[in-house]
Amino acid sequence: MIDLTNLLAQQGSVAVSIVLSTLAYSSPLILCALGGLFSERSGVVNIGLEGMMLSAACASALAAQATGSAAIGLVAGLLAATLLALLHWLLTQGYQIDHIVSGMGINALALGGTGLVFKSLPDINSKEMASFPAGFYYGLAWLAAAVIWWMLRDTRPGLRLTAVGNDPDKSRQMGLKPVRIRFQALLGTGLLTGLAGTLVASSAGRFSEDMTAGRGYIALAALILGAWKPWPTLAAALAFGFFGSLQLSLQGQSPMGIQIPDQVWQALPYLITLVALAGTLGKGKAPSGLGKP
C-alpha cells in the first residue's frame, strides 16, 4: 500500500513537472507565433521572428542587469524587437525588398550583433538579471491569444488587417492603405516577439549567445500548423512545448538498454516540426495576399 502511494505520488510529481516544463517551453513560442500572426495576416511574410526574439533577449538582459530593474529590461526588449520589426516593414513595404531576403537579413543581423555584444562585454553575466515572475509572461501569452482572436473577429482594425492580408489590391479600392495597416501590424509583431525574447532571457536569468536556439523558426511552424489562426496556433505551440519538455526528461535515459546520445533527444522538437510540416503543408489556408505589395 505504501509502495503504491509512493508510486502515485512519484507519477503525480512527474506529471506536474511535465506540465510546468511544457508551459515554460511553449510560452515564448506562443508569444512569438502570435507576433508572426500579426505580420502574416497583414500580408508580410516574416521569417525574421528568430532575430527579433534573440535581439530582445539580449537587450532585456543587458538593461535589466545594468539597472537592476525588471521593468526597464522589459521595455528594452520590446524596443529592440520592435525596431527590427519596423526595419522589416521598411525594407518590404518601403523598398519592396523580397520578404524572405529581408527576414534572413534580420536574422543574420541579430545573430551577429548579439554575438558581438556578448563577446565585447565579458562581464555580461556577472549577475542574474532582474525579471518579472514567469507566470506574468505565461498569462500574457494566453491573454494575447484571446485578445487577437477577438480583435480579428469583432473589431474594425482586425477586419481591416484581414482584408489587407487577403487582397491588398481590393482593399486599396475600398479606401484602405495597406502600407499603414502593415506598419501597425508589424508594431504588434515587435511587441509580442519582444515579450517572447524577454521571457527567454528571464527564464535563464542572463543572456547567452544564440540562446533562442531556433525557437523563432519553431514558432513560425506553429503559425503555419495553426493555419494563421490564434487558438490553433496556440495549440500547435503547446504541442511543440510538450515535445520540448519531453526531450529534457528523456536526456540520459536508455530505453530498452540502448544508449542514445543527448543530441538525439535535443533534436526531437525539430524532428517533430519537420514531420508535422510535411504532414500538413498545403492543407492550411495562408492569407491570399501574403507577400504581395
Image (cartoon, grey):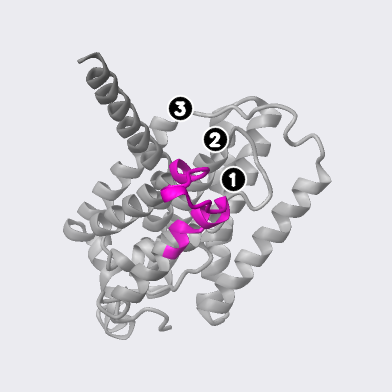
Dot 3 corresponds to which residue? Answer: 133
Residue 251 or 151: which is nearer the viewer? 251
Quadrant in which the N terminus appears:
top left
Measuring from the top left, give residue 91's x and y in whole percent. 57, 74
Q: Is residue 209 above or below residue 15?
A: below
**Quarter of the image where one finds residue 230:** bottom left
Earlier sequence position, callout 3 versus callout 2? 3
- From the image, tell me which residue sits under label 2: 202
Residue underneath mark 1: 57
Q: Relative to 89, is 239 above or below? A: above
Mark 3–mark 2 Cα distance, whole angstroms, equals: 8 Å
Mark 1 or mark 3: which comes first in sequence?
1
**Residue shown at 32%/77% (left/top)?**
281
Residue range highlighted in magenta: 247-271
Farthest-out residue, left: 154
Magenta stretch: helix, strand or loop mostly: helix
Q: Which element carries disc 1, helix, strand or loop?
A: helix
In the rendered image, residue 81, in percent from the top left (x then y), is placed at 55, 53
Residue depicted at x 35% and y 44%: 141
What amino acid type should be assigned to the residue bearing mark 1?
Ala
Residues under numbered marks 1 and 3 in contact, where contact means CB atoms less than 8 Å apart: no
Mark 1 Cα shell of 10 Å, populated few (<14), some (14-19), many (≥20): many
The crowd level at tag 2 (other Cα within 10 Å; few <14, some 14-19, many 20+) is many
